[in-house]
C-alpha cells in the first residue's frame, strides 16, 4: 500500500510515512477522528497532527472541518479510502454520532497502550468494517468493535474474539439485555447466511462482551448483566478522554 512517500521523521518533526499510512487506515476504520486523538495515535504533538492532516488534504486523501465542540475532525475522501483499499462510502462523520465515534476511538487508543494487546498481536475489527460485511436490510446488532486475539499470542485468552461496546447514554434494561443476549449467543461471523448466525451446539463467536461505560450508563449495564446472569459480560469505565469537549 503506497499512500504517502518519505522515510523516517524529518528534522522538523514531520510524521514518517509508515506512521502516516497507519494513521490513514485507522481514520478510515473509525469513520473519522478529532485532531487531538490523531496526535495521541501518532504519539506526537498537535502541531504534527495538523501538519499531517494538511499533507493528507493537499494530496486529496482527506478533508477536515470543525463539526462540533473541541478540535476539528478529519475524515477520508473517496481517494483516501481507495488508497487504503477500503470500500466505505466517503462522508464526514454523522453529527449525531460524533460523541459515540470519539468514545469508541478513545477505547481503541487506550487498548493500544496495553502491553498484552500491543505485544500479543491483537486485531481490532471496527464496526465500520462489520457494517460493510452485512447485507442491506439485515437486523443484526453490530458491536462497536471486535477484538481478535491470535492463537499464538500465548495469553490465557488466546484465540478468543471479544465484542466491544462503548456506552455513553443509558438504554433501557430490556434493550441492553437483548443486545447482550444477541452478542453472546451468536456463533457465525457477520455477513454469514442467517441460518449460520446462531447454530445450537456451536461455540459462541464472542468469548466475552466488554462494556466500557460512562457513569450515566453504568447502572443500566450492571442491571442488564444481572438480569441476564451472564458471566461473560465485563464492565469497565470509559477512558477520561472518551468525551466530547463541552460546548463553549
Image (spheres, rainbow, N blue to C red):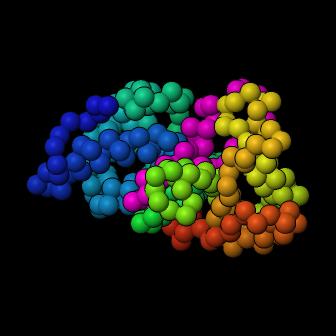
- At 68% from the left edge and 66% from the top edge, which residue is drawn? 234
- At 68% from the left edge and 51% from the top edge, which residue is drawn? 206
- At 80% from the left edge and 38% from the top edge, which residue is drawn? 199
Segment tinted magenta in the rendering: 117-146
Is 158 or 129 nearer to us in this picture? 158
Q: Quadrant of the N terminus?
A: top left
Residue 69 among those drawn in magenta: no
Residue 124 among those drawn in magenta: yes
- At 66% from the left edge and 37% from the top edge, which residue is drawn? 189
Q: Is residue 50 above or below residue 194?
A: below
Q: Quadrant of the C terminus?
A: bottom right
Q: Residue 228's image quarter?
A: bottom right
Q: Is residue 125 left or right of residue 203?
A: left
Q: Position of residue 124 (x, y in %)?
A: 51, 49
**Residue 248 visible (yes or no):** no
Q: Is residue 106 above or below residue 3?
A: below
Q: Is residue 228 left or right of residue 119?
A: right
Amino acid at each position: 500500500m503506497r499512500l504517502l512517500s518519505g522515510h523516517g521523521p524529518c528534522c522538523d518533526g514531520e510524521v514518517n510515512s509508515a506512521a502516516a499510512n497507519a494513521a490513514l487506515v485507522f481514520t478510515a476504520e473509525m469513520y473519522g477522528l478529532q485532531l487531538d486523538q490523531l496526535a495521541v495515535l501518532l504519539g506526537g504533538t498537535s502541531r504534527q497532527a495538523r501538519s499531517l492532516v494538511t499533507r493528507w488534504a493537499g494530496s486529496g486523501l482527506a478533508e477536515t472541518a470543525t463539526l462540533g465542540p473541541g478540535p476539528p475532525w478529519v475524515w477520508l475522501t473517496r481517494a483516501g479510502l481507495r488508497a487504503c483499499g477500503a470500500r466505505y462510502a466517503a462522508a464526514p462523520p454523522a453529527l449525531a454520532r460524533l460523541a459515540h465515534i470519539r468514545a469508541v476511538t478513545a477505547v481503541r487508543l487506550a487498548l493500544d497502550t496495553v502491553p498484552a494487546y500491543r505485544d500479543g498481536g491483537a486485531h481490532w475489527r471496527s464496526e465500520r468494517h462489520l457494517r460493510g460485511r452485512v447485507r442491506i436490510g439485515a437486523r443484526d446488532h453490530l458491536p462497536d468493535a471486535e477484538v481478535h486475539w491470535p492463537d499464538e499470542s500465548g495469553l490465557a485468552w488466546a484465540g478468543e474474539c471479544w465484542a466491544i461496546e462503548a456506552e455513553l447514554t443509558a438504554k433501557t434494561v430490556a434493550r441492553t439485555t437483548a443486545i447482550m443476549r444477541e452478542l453472546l449467543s451468536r456463533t457465525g461471523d457477520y455477513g454469514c447466511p442467517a441460518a449460520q448466525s446462531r447454530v445450537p451446539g456451536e461455540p459462541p463467536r464472542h468469548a466475552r462482551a466488554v462494556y466500557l461505560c460512562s457513569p450515566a450508563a453504568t447502572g443500566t449495564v450492571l442491571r442488564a448483566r444481572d438480569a441476564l446472569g451472564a458471566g461473560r459480560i465485563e464492565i469497565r469505565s470509559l477512558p477520561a478522554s472518551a468525551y466530547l469537549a463541552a460546548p463553549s
